């Protein structure tokens, strides 16, 4: 399969979408080195089944608050209810499904380059009883008509897409005039540098300390089996092929404006929270699943929340935005009309 060969077999999503391929062959992985889109499909098909668990994604109050909070931070105010929303690079549906549960949109379409991710996102949506359809789709060529959506969203997807100019043009094409886009969870150029270094250092220390006799026997086994650690390292190698961009907030704004977007605004968040969060996340991935327990999970989440609060209330006032880890961007499609918020409620159309 190549990145352009995405329409062979049906996976039950109700269209001619290709089937998930969670077990890539060595030849496919080798071919992916020269094809970032193929790398994305292979990596994310491989991850789809365990993605929610890996990233502690849930569809309850915790993640609804987080998703709506990111939306409001980007959009610069309370999220007005939108009619029909599209998500690009939906993964398992984390962003749009939680936004819909939080009342940000009434109906939605989830799309992703990875058939495995679309399948899981649709399963999650059905389990939540949400009005959602889905397609396997490349964000550079969105398979929907002009002026279809009131809102386009994405979380942690822009940094995987080779041609961002084409993507923003497509986003503006499928948005109705006055429709809004919100992308969140994109690594900044400086933030990515320190997050990677912190992650690598934590991995190195944890995988060595857990080999010590005290932690590999006497206090219970804290070491993950070598085969699992090797698999994580292989996944990390494929991951390095799918991460294509990091962002300077000024340049990101310029890209969206050049595509024709209006009212463009990038914001950033997470500085102390990233310095805490990346080592913690890497540590959690390096020890056996379930070893740390719910007490640790609560401690990690609450501490991360406190650091996030410090970033939002204090550090964002004194530290330049490019030093924060996460970038978010919003803008509006031109062609007339105000921001399609409340006016796009189905009962007000
Ligand atoms: C880091 S994951 C984020 C998933 C989800 N949005 C979340 O936040 O949990 C990035 C997703 O973007 C998808 N993706 C990568 N390149 C893409 C492209 N060109 N078009 C559409 N989706 C793409 C990947 O398959 C993957 O599911």
Image (cartoon, rainbow, N blue to C red):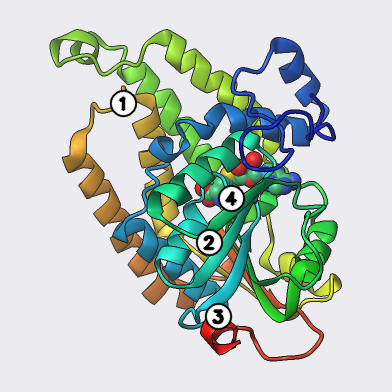
Query: Tag 2: Cα neighbours inside 10 Å, few (<14), some, or many (≥20)?
Result: many
- The numbered dot on residue 304 is none
Q: Which image quarter: residue 302?
A: bottom left
Q: Secondary structure at mark 1?
A: loop
Query: Tag 4: Cα neighbours inside 10 Å, few (<14), some, or many (≥20)?
Result: many
Q: Secondary structure at mark 2?
A: loop
Mark 2 Cβ and ligand 1 under 8 Å apart: no
- The numbered dot on residue 90 is 4
Check contact, mark 2 vs mark 4: CB within 8 A.
no
Q: Is residue 347 above or below residue 45?
A: below
- The numbered dot on residue 289 is 1
| Picture coordinates of residue 66, whole percent (x, y) | 40, 62
Labels 2, 4: front one: 4
Mark 4 Cβ and ligand 1 under 8 Å apart: yes
| Picture coordinates of residue 118, whole percent (x, y) | 59, 42
Find disc 2 in the rendering and name its residue: 324
Labels 2, 3: front one: 3
At 33% from the left edge and 24% from the top edge, which residue is drawn?
287
| Picture coordinates of residue 273, whole percent (x, y) | 39, 56
Check contact, mark 4 vs mark 1: CB within 8 A.
no
Which callout, 3 or 1, points at the residue further toward the start of the chain? 1
Q: What distance separates the C-alpha of mark 4 from that of mark 3?
A: 24 Å
């Amino acid at each position: 399969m190549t990145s352009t060969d995405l329409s062979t077999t049906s996976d039950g999503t109700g269209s001619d979408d290709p089937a998930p391929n969670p077990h890539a062959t060595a030849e496919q992985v080798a071919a992916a080195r020269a094809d970032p889109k193929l790398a994305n499909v292979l990596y994310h098909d491989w991850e789809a089944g365990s993605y929610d668990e890996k990233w502690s994604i849930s569809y309850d109050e915790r993640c609804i608050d987080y998703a709506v909070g990111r939306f409001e931070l980007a959009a610069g105010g309370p999220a007005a209810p939108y009619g029909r929303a599209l998500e690009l690079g939906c993964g398992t549906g984390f962003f749009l499904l939680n936004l819909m549960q939080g009342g940000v949109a009434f109906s939605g379409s989830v799309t992703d380059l990875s058939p495995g991710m679309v399948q899981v996102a649709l399963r999650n949506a059905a389990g939540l009883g949400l009005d959602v359809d889905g397609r396997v789709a490349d964000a550079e060529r969105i398979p929907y008509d002009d002026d279809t959506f009131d809102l386009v969203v994405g979380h942690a997807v822009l940094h995987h897409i080779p041609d961002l100019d084409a993507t923003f043009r497509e986003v503006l094409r499928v948005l109705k005039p006055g429709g809004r886009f919100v992308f969140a969870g994109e690594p900044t150029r400086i933030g990515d540098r320190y997050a990677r270094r912190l992650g690598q250092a934590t991995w190195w220390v944890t995988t060595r300390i857990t080999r010590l006799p005290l932690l590999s026997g006497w206090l219970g086994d804290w070491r993950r089996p070598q085969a699992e650690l090797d698999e994580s390292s292989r996944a990390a190698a494929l991951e390095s092929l799918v991460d294509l961009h990091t962002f300077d907030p000024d340049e990101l704004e310029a890209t969206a404006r050049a595509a024709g977007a209006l009212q463009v605004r990038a914001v950033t968040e997470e500085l102390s929270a990233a310095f805490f969060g990346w080592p913690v996340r890497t540590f959690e991935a390096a020890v056996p699943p379930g070893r740390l327990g719910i007490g640790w999970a609560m401690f990690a989440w609450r501490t991360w929340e406190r650091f996030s609060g410090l970033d939002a209330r204090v550090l964002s006032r004194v530290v330049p935005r490019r030093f924060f880890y996460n970038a978010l961007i919003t803008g509006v499609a031109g062609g007339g009309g105000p921001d399609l918020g409340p006016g796009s409620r189905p009962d007000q159309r």
